[in-house]
Amino acid sequence: MPIRTEPVTINLGPQHPSTHGVFRLRVTFDGEEVIDLEPVFGYLHRGTEKLAEERTYTQIVTLTDRLDYESAMSNNLGYVTALEKLGGIEVPERAMYLRVISVELQRIASHLVFTGFFLQELGTFVTMLMYCFRERERILDLFEMLCGARITVSYMRPGGLTQDAPSDFWPALNDFLEDMPGYIDELEELITRNEIVLSRTRDVGVLDPEVAIDASISGPILRASGVQWDLRKADPYEIYSEMDFEIPIGATGDCFDRYIVRLQEMRESVKIIKQCVDKIPDGTVKTDGAFFMRPPEGDAYGCVEAPRGELGFYIVSDGGISPYRCKIRSPSFINTTMLRDMIVGGKMSDLIVIFGSLAVNMGEVDR
Amino acid sequence: MELGFRNIHAFVSGILPDGLEWIAFSISGIFLALVVINALVGVAALYTWFERRVLGRFQSRLGPNRWGPFGLLQPLADIIKLITKEDISPNSADRIVSTLAPIALLVPAFLVFAIIPFGTNSFLGDLNVGVLFIMGVTGMNTFGIFMGGWGSRNKYAMLGAMRGVAMLVSYEVPMALALAGAVLLAGSLSLSGIVASQTLPFLIVQPLGFLVFIIAASAEMSRAPFDMIEAESELTGGYHTEFSGIKFAIFQLAEFMAPLVTAAILTVVFLGGSRGPDLIPGQVWFILKALAATFLLLWIRATWPRLRVDQIMGFAWKGLFPLALLNIFLIAAEIQFFQSGGIEPIGVSTLLIMSGINWLVTGIAIYILANVLGQPSLQPKKPVPSPLANMYAEAE
Amino acid sequence: MSLSSTIESSVITNIAFWVVSISVIVSSFAVVQIRDLFRAALFLVLAFIGIAGMFILLRAEFLAVVQILIYVGAISVLIIFAILMTRDVSDGNPPNRLKIPASIVGLIFFLVFTFVMVQVDWNIQPHPDPLPDTYQEDSVEVYTKFSYFHVCFWFFCDPKHSDSESPADREVQDDTSYVLDEKLDSDRDQSGLDKIFTDTIPSIAELLLRDFVLAFELVSILLLAAMIGALTLIREK
Amino acid sequence: MYGTGIIRGLRITLKNLLLPSRMFTLHQYPDRKVGILWLAQNADINPLKYVLANPGKSIRAIIGLETVEDRQPKHPRFRGEEFTWYEQRCTGCASCAKYCPLGIIRIVTEPSGNAMPEGEKYGIEVFDIDIGRCMFCGLCVEACPYDALHLGSGFEEGTYKREELVIDIDRLRKSRKKPSTWFRPQLEEKSYDPGIGRDVDWTEAGRHESPSSDDQAAKWAKR
């Protein structure tokens, strides 16, 4: 004679501290256990794709900043990559190196934000968040040197960058690269062997590699499931083919692996930036005329490995000054699709941890 | 003159004519309650400042520092802000229950302080069932949380309250058992008796009891790593989600009283209360020890994440409960062995021997328990690349 | 006049007694009469707390604290928890449909208890060895309480001694009075206020763990069996 | 051993508590509470001497009331809120308005001069920038062919009303000329820093000198 309990349906969000923006989950609980879940998006819809049809090609760069506002550089790069494919624009080599440096810095910053908020959701009051943001602040300072802005950078332009790095950027970057491995070690010692973190995240929200591939999951979440897939190696863009780095993968595909993969990716990013600093050539960073571009009729799909996964832009041009269509394949949106399968059957706390481990950014989901 | 009920009563009844003892009794009681409660509220307000500053430094930031010297007036500003805020409650809320909830949460915290011996005695003198009183009274705060959760008719609050009740009831058991060890050793249920018998602080004599007590107490006051009642990342505040204004202020006050209460009990039962070298007065010793205890609690709060609800319950019954039983068994056996028959207090040398044994047993017990409870699945695994999408193969 | 005697004799005690008794009675009525189930449970808590207050007035602070610890801290919480778990919490407070049966059962219990209380010889007698001056009143009160205990245990555990020659008498003669005497002797040196709370715990401990240890253990085993049975009943599959 | 990880975590937080170099907040906007040691160090004398010299200030510093102004240092390239506009350089071509992704720049021009020779600038009647909607992408600055419009370096333009966030031509004229060096390599070459630097005159702000009216007339009208 089991005691029958009433299922309770709760609207988790749109205003909730753990939903990373305005995201609504209709969750049905049986006590603490999640028995059903339905994600509802659209609360942050800003019509980026439609707005892009009304902007010139260069103006769209500013729109991409706002997609995944934690990694604006990567979004810029994804867009300009597609545009350069479409317009057949050659990019100067120095610009490519600077692009890789800024994108990898952005990856570290984004993963730091992920780590901070992930642990915040695990319940470390705000300590880890502050530590991670302290480290991220230095990256933002570097961005301020590069392009005058810290979050919404709009640094890249079709055919290059807005401007070269200032002279004081390089010593600051070197300082940061020296300190960063120490920061990562500290984070690792603080968290990675922490039994509470382990017991909260191990074997929680396991995503099998088959399921992940079928659902077209990408980025660290895919790699945490053990699939060694990274666009930087699989389809090298910019100068990644010259770089020497590893693709960290996880063992089981649980929340802990998603965290540890990101942590190791930060180390790899530091490695990549160091190589870039060593190899960067002199020269210009801009292509003349690309600011006022009018690409030929046709279409192009350009994609990069953004911190959250494969970020793709599909641009159709009708020969005018603005694209006929600009489709954005945002990694967060596609990674969110597996939410129900991962969460149902877990506890409420697991729900928060799993959702946090996906590092979904609502700006990107709703576009 | 020491502030105590007896002194006040003697003073008041000296002024009043004979035959009015009951008026003297009431006056002195009300006066004492007024003084003590106001002092405690003041101390709790100061403690919020302390907690926020220390927590801020732990988190490598500054904490409140703008308003007044070193931000000391920040609690005042907070109180003014909270009092002047509109008191909103949901339309379908149970008004009476939700109004009483903050009071039900706050009163037990004040009641505990009535029997804490700051000096040689508490304000009210000595209660012979002090430890039991503490257990009974601290168990009452369940009702505050429950009434808050139920009365505000909010599902988050409800979930928080349900978690809270399940957790508080479970953790009362190891907490009581941990206190029982101290009671056995002291041979007295009264807090003054426990203080008097601590020629060696019980922290040294029974580390296991201290450990169990501090863990269970941080669960009882729902602080990290057991703060799932509020769990701001999951329940957006838990039972006080729907509270605002003065009710919320009282909830916060009760919440900030909790570490003070715990620190006071810890100090009395395990750190030797107001005992200490005579260089500084006993009350100062008491405050120093209590501050050290609150610092320890803050340190833990600043570092550890939160456990999941089933893990918290499992930890109470599978981890703390056996440890507490072991502690009681150990202490009882030692008392039986060392104190064979006599009723004279145990000497310091014997206590030292006992503590040696206890530390050893504590280490072994924790080691065994950690390896029994610690799941081997938590150990890192070696990642194997899945053959499904081999990037290197495709790149070639 | 010393403080303890003030408390004994003063109006305060009477006021406290009336406040507590009225609140216990009113909240007990509310438990069965009120429509809102959650509030009824809260009134039950109030009634329990009031009874703890009565115990304190009877100078049985150990019993009072145990009353709070067990009845308020554990049993009421479980009742409220059960209300919460088994009803539809989203539709407001579940109604109390058992008003009339509960009233009838409550009335029957009230009558039975009144009958028992009136009928039973409570064995209240002065201390065999009267103590000098102020301690006399104390001792009588304490003594009353212990007799009550004895009667209860005797009533349920030892049906052989059903006549007035109960073991309670004998124990009062030898064990308890000895303990009390010793305690009071040691108290004589201390100052007045401590006498408000006389140390009753050793006596209770002796009764529970020496004289009635078999009954005590039996009750423990019964409770354990009940707990395991409850677990078995609700366990799925 | 299982169970040591949480203890190690405690060590890290304690390290962060104790080491001053691990502080996150190094700047306290807008003013910073300073202690007596800082004051003495700033005055470059012995703290003991400092206490004797100005006891009032010392007491205030000890009880934590002494403050100094403190600003977050900004890189010269920082894209600040208000715009720096040089009327002398502006031709009213409205490139900035065209390139603004949000269309928040409004320019109304009128023919100026008596005969309006070809190449001479227009008179500018209205130049509104609604920085309440501006996202400081800098495309307007990038688009300006005559380096007339620069991003500013301030970040204290907060107001209580949205309407006050519209920078009109009078405010642009009157505002201090402290342009950000973003997209202005000519300013960067002079290692100009708006945080500490002086105001920049319109003649030095551009990549090239604006030709005078006579030159233009000689080049176009009187050839």
Image: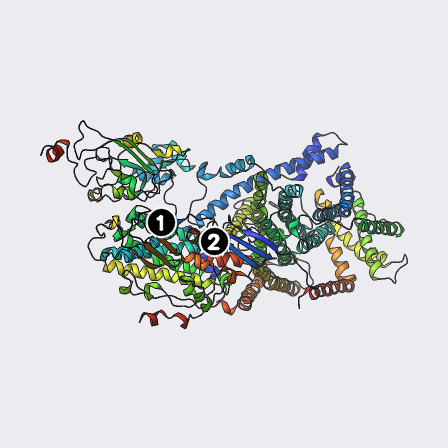
Q: From what the image shows, is residue B112 above or below residue B28? A: below
Residue D35 found in image quarter: top left
* Subunit under mark 2: A
Query: Can residue A348 be seen here?
Result: yes
* Subunit under mark 1: A
As measured in the structure, the alpha-carbon distance from the residue carrying label 2 to the one carrying label 1 is 35 Å
Residue toward you, C202 or C103: C103
- Residue where numbered disc 2 is placed: A120
Residue toward you, B125 or C33: C33
Numbered circle sitting on residue A52: 1
Task: Please name the residue shown 47% across and 47% down the image.
Answer: B54
Location of residue A117 in the rendering, given as x and y in whole percent from the top left corner: 45, 53
Location of residue B284 in the rendering, given as x and y in whole percent from the top left corner: 54, 44
Residues indicated by labels 2 and 1 sit on the same polypeptide chain: yes
Local packing at callout 1 (Cα closer than 10 Å; few below 14, some 14-19, many 20+) is: many
Residue toward you, B171 or A18: A18
Q: Secondary structure at mark 1?
A: helix
Q: Split into 4 quadrants, where in the image is the C terminus of chain B?
A: bottom left
- Single out the mark in the foreground, 2 or 1: 1
Residue toward you, B225 or B342: B225
